[in-house]
Image (cartoon, rainbow, N blue to C red):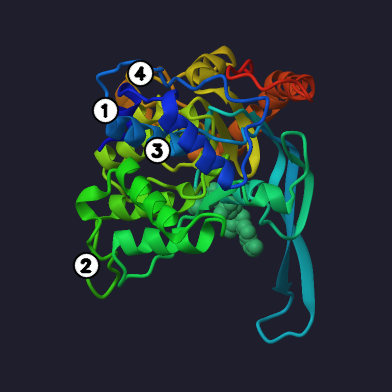
């Protein structure tokens, strides 16, 4: 079952079955905040022909569809430095020189419930480090502020965060159903009965379209199991079980074919539209994938060169003198080139490669510095204002950033 198919299907929020669902939600000791997501697109259906069974089934699905604690994430001037220890004279020298390296520098952003933010940038640009800091798992010299509904990170917030890491750890000998059932038994609150926990695992399997492989083993290096895309969905499912308000994912589509990647991104978008705040890193998205992001942040060597709506990114770079040399270019390819300091020239196409090579060797750093300064001049002040203005205000579903 495709999640976006479900977006089009009826989702019942009224009726007695809904009361039961609410009762169950309450029994998970979660409460609906007054600033509920305004972006939930579930239509209300009042059709007597829908059977009780169907009603209860759809209503149960809505448990996973809605976030119960919408979270507005803000990260302001996040910088992170690490200490590098290197030998001064040689490998066996006891004289060690301590150097520092800046991994992130003044990174800012705001993501509201219902929004999907993608972090883009070349390998080593700091995407995972930023995601880890948002998850509250970064240790070391870290400065700046990260808040969740204007509150600092706390253990109660930790429980509302789902973090899907790049290298998912799954037991190869368990089936999909066993993996998710054990996760449900271990992670769901003790107020739920075991039967209810098992039902939640079944719901997640349906929601993520894993029904066909529910009894297949995960597999590993020694024996083949489910596919890479299914495996990634199992990892996402493990986090979905606890209905996180803030879902963070590190490279959820890496190594997957474009159709599977698109399917996973549809799932993430659908989770966001249920009032969750979704942040993902991504390496090389296709243009179809790119269009699914509400907002993007583009990093080069730890510094942002763009933050804002994905639909406005090309316009922004064109306004500061950077445009792709030809039409129909995947915006993500263009942005990654820019983040690497490679500009596209509008001159004749067969000169293009040569120009790119020259840029790489001679002008890369200058281009990056120019992009960083343009960001500081054009985007940073507006973003700072947006973050300050949204302080303690009701959460809205639309974004007003660049
Ligand atoms: N604890 C650490 N010690 C040494 N280097 C580190 C440490 N943490 C991060 N780095 C370096 O910081 C840079 C950013 O790393 P990060 O994993 O955030 O990049 P990334 O953009 O996610 O890369 P990729 O796309 O390849 O996963 C890299 O050059 C990495 O080697």
Name the quarter where the C terminus is drawn. Answer: top right
Given contact means CB atoms under 8 Å apart, are the residues at marks 3 and 4 in contact? no
Badge 2 crowding class, 10 Å Cα cut-off, few under 14, some 14 to 19, many 20 or more, is: few
Q: Is residue 174 left or right of residue 33?
A: left
Q: Which of the marked residues, 1 or 4, is nearer the chain's N terminus?
A: 1
Q: Which residue is mark 2?
A: 224
User: Which residue is painted at 54% across and 49% down in the image?
Assistant: 162
Q: Which residue is mark 4?
A: 326
Say which of 64 and 117 sits in front: 64
Q: Tell me if I can see residue 167 in this picture.
A: no
User: Which residue is painted at 77% across and 85% down in the image?
Assistant: 94
Badge 3 crowding class, 10 Å Cα cut-off, few under 14, some 14 to 19, many 20 or more, is: many
Q: How many marks?
A: 4
The Cα atoms of the two marked residues, 3 and 1, are separated by 14 Å
Of labels 2 and 4, the one closer to you: 2
The Cα atoms of the two marked residues, 2 and 3, are separated by 33 Å
Q: Is residue 245 left or right of residue 236?
A: right
Q: Secondary structure at mark 3?
A: helix
Q: Is residue 192 above or below residue 389?
A: below
Of labels 1 and 4, the one closer to you: 1
The Cα atoms of the two marked residues, 1 and 4, are separated by 55 Å
Say which of 291 and 233 sits in front: 233
Given contact means CB atoms under 8 Å apart, are the residues at marks 2 and 3 in contact? no
Q: Which residue is mark 1?
A: 51
- Where residue 224 appears, as percent x and y from the top left, is 21, 67
Q: Which residue is mark 3?
A: 60
Q: Secondary structure at mark 4?
A: loop
Residue 170 falls in which quadrant of the image?
bottom left
């Amino acid at each position: 079952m495709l999640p976006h198919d479900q977006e089009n299907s009826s989702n019942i929020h009224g009726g007695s079955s809904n009361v039961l669902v609410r009762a169950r939600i309450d029994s998970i000791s979660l409460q609906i905040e007054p600033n509920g997501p305004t972006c939930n697109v579930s239509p209300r259906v009042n059709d007597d022909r829908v059977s009780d069974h169907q009603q209860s089934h759809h209503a149960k699905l809505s448990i996973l569809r809605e976030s119960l604690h919408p979270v507005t994430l803000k990260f302001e001037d996040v910088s992170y430095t690490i200490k590098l220890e290197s030998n001064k004279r040689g490998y066996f020298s006891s004289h060690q020189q301590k150097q520092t390296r800046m991994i992130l520098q003044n990174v800012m952003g705001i993501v509201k419930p219902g929004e999907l933010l993608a972090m883009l940038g070349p390998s080593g640009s700091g995407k995972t480090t930023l995601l880890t800091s948002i998850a509250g798992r970064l240790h070391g010299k870290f400065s700046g502020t990260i808040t969740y509904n204007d509150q600092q990170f706390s253990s109660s917030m930790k429980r509302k965060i789902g973090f899907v890491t790049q290298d998912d750890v799954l037991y190869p000998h368990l089936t999909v159903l066993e993996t998710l059932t054990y996760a449900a038994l271990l992670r769901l609150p003790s107020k739920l009965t075991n039967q209810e926990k098992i039902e939640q695992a079944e719901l997640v399997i349906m929601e993520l379209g894993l029904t066909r492989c529910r009894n297949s083993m995960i597999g590993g290096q020694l024996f083949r199991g489910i596919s890479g895309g299914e495996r990634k969905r199992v990892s996402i499912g493990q986090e979905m079980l606890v209905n996180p308000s803030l879902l963070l994912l590190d490279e959820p589509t890496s190594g997957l074919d474009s159709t599977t990647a698109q399917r996973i991104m549809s799932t993430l978008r659908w989770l966001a539209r249920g009032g969750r705040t979704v942040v993902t890193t991504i390496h090389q998205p296709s243009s179809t994938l790119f269009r699914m992001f509400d907002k993007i942040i583009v990093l080069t060597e730890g510094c942002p060169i763009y933050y804002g709506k994905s639909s406005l990114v090309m316009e922004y770079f064109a306004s500061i003198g950077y445009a792709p040399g030809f039409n129909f270019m995947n915006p993500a390819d263009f942005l990654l080139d820019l983040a690497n300091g490679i500009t596209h020239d509008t001159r004749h196409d067969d000169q293009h490669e040569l120009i790119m090579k020259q840029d790489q060797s001679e002008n890369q750093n200058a281009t990056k510095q120019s992009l960083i300064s343009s960001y500081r001049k054009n985007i940073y002040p507006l973003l700072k204002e947006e973050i300050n203005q949204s302080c303690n205000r009701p959460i809205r579903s639309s974004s007003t950033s660049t």
